[in-house]
Amino acid sequence: EAGVAQSPRYKIIEKRQSVAFWCNPISGHATLYWYQQILGQGPKLLIQFQNNGVVDDSQLPKDRFSAERLKGVDSTLKIQPAKLEDSAVYLCASSLYVVNEQYFGPGTRLTVT
Amino acid sequence: DQQVKQNSPSLSVQEGRISILNCDYTNSMFDYFLWYKKYPAEGPTFLISISSIKDKNEDGRFTVFLNKSAKHLSLHIVPSQPGDSAVYFCAASAKTSYDKVIFGPGTSLSVIP
């Protein structure tokens, strides 16, 4: 079974630029999550999709972050414009059901200079 | 407000001995708890979970204990192996919050050969 795929693995941008991350979850997984992990902290949920509907986006900075999940499969997370404090690892995860173990991708390490 | 706490940022244990990783939580509505393990440059991987209706769950060398009255859980690894060296995240969720998972800051475990 293929795991959760993410791209790119690394990205360096200047502040005020825009960036997009892509995630392909495990086939058949209805729930998809985007997390932000700042160095030394645990992953923080940004947005949770159930199929292609948003279940929770309470911690998504909506003035600069946006996310979509097309046709209930792939998802993209965009930051526009980026700030220095957005430097972090962005993790995508998926699960078969909502209350279930989540499978994480390798993450995208974003550095904003 | 940190709802899931892991007060030990790091832990060193001799190979073959027991590793005990601790986790405290503040939200009494949490009803499902998980432990994830993370190696460098990889996403977290699910290790073991426990429902609030139980006080112990065991899977091979890994056992999780839950003390609801103290709002405390612990992960025991016996015997510890060098391959167990990783960052361990405690996580919790509540049905009342659409099962949104809250992660602790992690404990870095080093198993010394």
Image (cartoon, coloured by chain):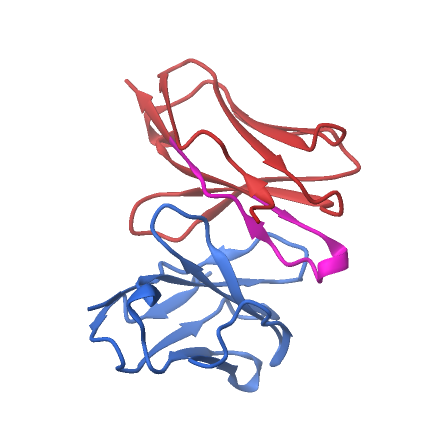
Chain colours: A blue, B red
Residue A48, image quadrant: bottom right
Residue B93 painted magenta: yes
Q: What segment is highlighted magenta in the picture? A: B91-108
- Residue B28 in the figure: left or right of residue B86: right
Q: How far from the left and from the top, in percent, is residue A7?
A: 32, 71
Which residue appears at 45% of the width and 29% of the height?
A: B8
Q: How far from the left and from the top, in percent, is residue A108?
A: 32, 64
Which residue appears at 43% of the width and 13% of the height?
A: B17
Q: Is residue A19 above or below residue B113?
A: below
Q: Confirm whether residue B58 shows in the render.
A: no
Q: Is residue B44 above or below residue B58?
A: below
Q: Which residue of the protein is positioned furthest toward the bottom in this rendering?
A: A71
Residue B75 painted magenta: no
- Residue A112 in the figure: left or right of residue B72: left
Residue B31, image quadrant: top right
- Residue A76 in the figure: left or right of residue A59: left
- Residue A52 in the figure: left or right of residue B37: right
Q: How far from the left and from the top, in percent, is residue B3?
A: 60, 46
A109 vs A3, nearest the viewer: A109
A49 vs B4, nearest the viewer: B4
Q: Is residue A15 above or below residue B76?
A: below
Which residue appears at 66% of the width and 62% of the height?
A: A97
Rendered-image quadrant of the C terminus of chain B: top left
